[in-house]
Image (tube, grey):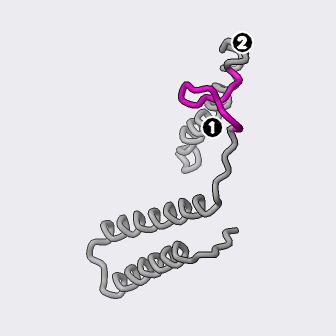
Amino acid sequence: MSLIVSYIPLVVVGIIALGFAPLAWWASRFIRPYKPTEWMETTYECGSDPIGEAHVQFRFQYYAFAIIFVVFDLVATFLMIWAVAYGGLSTMATVWMLLFFGMSILGVTYALKKEETVWI
């Protein structure tokens, strides 16, 4: 049995997995009842009647803060996995890992302390 033939079940499962969500969405359009009313078209605000417009504008710095947190969290997670997988690290590898981690901390600190930040 060749190597390519052994991957055929994986490809079939992948195609089924990728096709399941669009197929379920398409089928639900025909199965669900659709009876629009004025009450269904209003914005839900915890049982209260909506006041004003539903659109609320957030500052982009909040999104940037969230992105910085996610990146830093991923870096910390990968460093932890790396440290556990290679328990007997050499001294030089440990120094490079700590240097990278320290630079990440400095970058996050700089990004959060900068006042007039222009986020692109």
- Please tell me which of labels 1 and 2 falls first in the chain: 1
Between 31 and 83, which is closer to the camera in this rendering? Answer: 31
The three-letter code of the residue at mark 2 reads Lys
Q: How busy is the neighbourhood of tag 2: few (under 14 within 10 Å), some, or many (20 plus)?
A: few
Return the mark for residue 48: none
Question: What's drawn in magenta, residue-wise?
Answer: 40-53
Pointer 1 with pointer 2, Cβ within 8 A = no
Q: Mark 1 points at which residue?
A: 18
Q: Is residue 77 above or below residue 16?
A: below
Q: Where is residue 106 in the image (x, y as percent from the top left)?
A: 47, 80
Say which quarter of the image contains residue 62: bottom right
Furthest-front residue in this view: 51
Q: Residue at x 73, y 18 (%)?
A: 38
Describe the element under mark 2 as helix, strand or loop: loop
The three-letter code of the residue at mark 1 reads Leu
Horizontal relation, residue 15 to residue 104: left or right: right
Q: Residue at x 64, y 60 (%)?
A: 60
Which numbered mark, 1 or 2, is in the foreground of this view? 2
Q: Position of residue 26 (x, y in %)?
A: 70, 24
What's the CA distance linking mark 1 and mark 2? Answer: 30 Å
Find out whether residue 20 is within the magenta segment.
no
Between 110 and 7, which is closer to the camera in this rendering? Answer: 110
Describe the element under mark 1 as helix, strand or loop: helix
Say which quarter of the image contains residue 93: bottom left
Q: Residue at x 39, y 79 (%)?
A: 97
Q: Position of residue 10 (x, y in %)?
A: 54, 41
Q: Name the residue under label 2.
A: 35
Horizontal relation, residue 32 to residue 95: left or right: right
Between 16 and 25, which is closer to the camera in this rendering? Answer: 25
Q: How busy is the neighbourhood of tag 1: few (under 14 within 10 Å), some, or many (20 plus)?
A: few
Q: Where is residue 65 in the image (x, y as percent from the top left)?
A: 54, 63
Helix, strand or loop for the magenta stretch, by majority: loop
